[in-house]
Amino acid sequence: MPAGPFFTSGNVPIVSQLELNKIQAGKIHRFWLQLITDGMGTPVSVPVFVAKGPEKGPVLGLTAAVHGNEINGIPVIQRLFREIDPTRLHGTLVGVPVMNVPAVLQRQRRFFEESDLNAIMPGREDGNAAQVYAYRIVDRLIRHVDYLIDLHTAGFGRENSYHVKADLEDPVTRRMALLQNAPIIVHSPPSDGSLRGVADSLGIHSIALEVGNPQSFQRGIIRTGLTGIHNLLHDLGMEEGEIEIPVSRPTICRNAYWVFSDTGGILSVQPNLGDTVRQGQPIATLRNIFGDLIKEYYAPEDGLLIGKSSDPINQTGGRILYLGVLASDEEIKM
């Protein structure tokens, strides 16, 4: 049983610390892990699954909804813990289906005061509300795992292809990425302030799965996400079974970036998700409210359309599309 203050909410314990070495093996446990209290003194807690096997092994962490509108990862984690057999597990599986509880409840992307939790990690022990929340997430959850898969989606007004972001120069995270059977993998070293960034600084191997669109459940993508996680469990020796090999090899991008508008208007993006575009190819138009063409945008270089704006109302500096730059044959083999 986890140490620290211990209460119950229904039949789910509320704890202030998650001590995996004290959790009973061979079972799936559910906890509310308290992080902060709100202005009325009510606990704000994150839901946590723990499946601890009877045999020793690594600790794999799964996190979702670090942004409040990125809910496609929630059923991925829920279904995984329905499928896993804890009596045959080697190691421990920790799942947090909602990281940013206040934002999910408010149906918004960011934490209080418009703070982006995925930009302020590892937070501060003595900081503002968002910084303390981020600090306690890292201190009470993230530091306990050996491997981490962080599930994301596109933001409001955008849509994403299913893809993986990983540091492909690291052989461990490269293999984690390839096991996900995603059609697109983007080389993306972890950045300061992100959950992957702080995980990397703690020596935790981590990747990010971009599992579709915001504020929605997409069954096909959820199934694909589950397959990749089971592949990783098999590869780490945590679960018996064979790795499912994809039908086709993924497209590797050496980097990806957003193309932005420099004026406002009614936006129409022409290519579809997954399309390849050539330098100079028309990719979008902006029209004024009377329907007159204001500006046409062209691909700045050859690439793959990974994400795009789905919101026609586009102000100056708005996102148009997320362009992946294809890796060379030498970079693919790195």
Image (cartoon, rainbow, N blue to C red):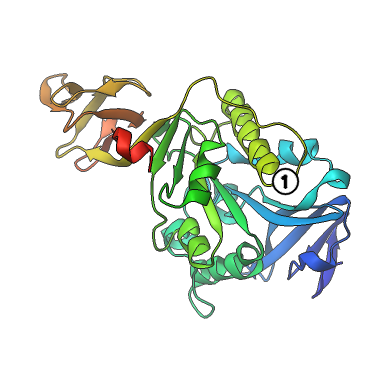
- When the figure is inspected, residue 28 is found, relative to residue 85, above or below; the finding is below
For image coordinates 55% across by 70% down, the residue present is: 135
Give the number of callouts.
1
Does the image show residue 85? yes
Q: Nearer the viewer, residue 80 or 37?
A: 80
- When the figure is inspected, residue 61 is found, relative to residue 203, above or below; the finding is above
Quarter the C terminus occupies? top left
In the image, 314: left or right of 229?
left
Which image quadrant is residue 132 in? bottom right
Image x and y of residue 42, in percent: 69, 66
Q: Nearer the viewer, residue 133 or 90?
A: 90
Residue type indicated by callout 1:
Gly
Which image quadrant is residue 298 in? top left
Residue pushed farthest bottom?
Answer: 126
Image x and y of residue 325, in percent: 28, 35
Quarter the N terminus occupies? bottom right
Image x and y of residue 138, in percent: 58, 66
Q: Which residue is mark 1?
A: 237
- When the figure is inspected, residue 164 is found, relative to residue 121, above or below; the finding is above
Q: Nearer the viewer, residue 328 or 268?
A: 328
Q: Secondary structure at mark 1?
A: loop
In the image, 284: left or right of 244?
left
In the image, 6: left or right of 110?
right
For image coordinates 52% across by 70% down, the residue present is: 129
Image x and y of residue 331, in percent: 32, 40
Does the image show residue 311? no
Categorize mark 1 by other alpha carbons within 10 Å: few (<14), some (14-19), many (20+). some
Which image quadrant is residue 205 in? bottom right
Q: Nearer the viewer, residue 86 or 33?
A: 86
